Amino acid sequence: MLKRLAATAVAALTALPVHAETYGVLMKTLANPFWGAMELGVREGAEAAGVEYYLQAVESDQAAEPQLNVCNTMLERQPDAMITAAINSTILLPCLKRANEMGIPVVDLDGNLDHEIAADAGVEIAFSIGSDNVAAGGQGAEWLVSQLGAGASGPVLVIEGLSGNITGQKRARGFAEKLAELAPGLEIVASLPGDWDRGKAANITNDILTSHPDLVAIFAANDGMALGAVETVYAAGKGGAVIVIGVDGNSDAVKSIKAGRLNASVAQLPYLVGKQAVEMVKAGGDYEDWIFVPTMVLTKEILDAGTDPMLEYVK
């Protein structure tokens, strides 16, 4: 297992049960390749750890109320642990508080829960596991500057995730802060919520290209939105002229990068997140609040070479 990097403003340690054997796993939507890869990690992690699990998901990344209903239903089976990827920072809190009251530890997949908000609601999170989303956004900016140079100038578009979602907010913030630090001439002229939706991202891109035909680059907070932006860029005859960067490293993004369309994706390695989450719950013990798995920038050169050992976890 790769070395786990943990970081938190206030490091609180929470003990997990050593003998938990059946876990409830609640995800967003398996229609998104990101969560499909994480499900594969959960499955293989459970096989390796010798535990049982039952997994449920909702129909879309925006189905907040249905996700709460599914969470409450899952608790009726009294799992030994609840491993959840909440659609936003608040929707699952009533269910997760009930889980705590039942003595069921709660694990946060992909850092979708805000620990302070959860604590205020009476929810104790055993640990959050995922990528450092601020750092991932920063990696996107670093790669962009490596291509254009620190002295580059021109307009840049940021397409955020679902409004109110902490993951998308952190990615967009990390990108913006690092870009301002490394190449102040690259100006973010719009930062708009794309709601994790490919079509909406395509429309946003079209609007910004109309108002800023000299657009230099687009950073999208996930690959689905990045691929929507790519479609618009090529339809406008600007393929290759506008750099498009996504986040997740999902299978659709990999195909697009290999085809020379999407320029890059900051791979979050969701497979590794799912696998380690299950293995860590099974192992038990004390963990810090935040467990970060590595990220990497996928490009055509890296994928074509196929030599980076981290590619093993790109699913």
Image: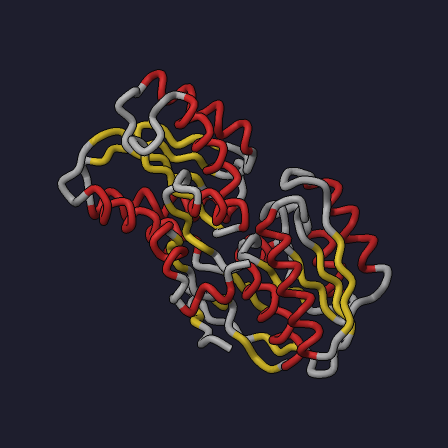
> Height in image: 171 above or below 135?
above
Q: Using the image, determine if residue 167 lies above or below residue 17.
A: above
Front-most of 300 and 82?
300
- Colour approach in the figure: secondary structure
Q: Is residue 232 above or below residue 114?
A: above
Q: Is residue 242 above or below residue 70?
A: above
Mark yes or no: residue 103 visible: no
Q: Residue at x 39, y 59 (%)?
A: 296
Q: Is residue 291 left or right of residue 38?
A: left
Depth check, front residue: 238 or 51: 238
For image coordinates 24% across by 42% down, the residue present is 180
Q: Residue furthest top?
A: 210
Q: Residue furthest left?
A: 151
Q: Which residue lies at the image location 44% right of the left edge and 66% below the top edge?
A: 310
Q: Nearer the viewer, residue 168 or 218?
A: 218
Can you give x and y, in whole percent of width and height, for residue 212 in the image?
A: 30, 20
User: Left or right: where does residue 21 sit relative to residue 195?
Assistant: right
- Percent from the top left, x then y, of residue 19? 74, 82
Q: What is the tally of numbered marks visible in this picture? A: 0
The C terminus appears in which quarter of the rendering? Answer: bottom right
Q: Position of residue 43 (x, y in %)?
A: 69, 66
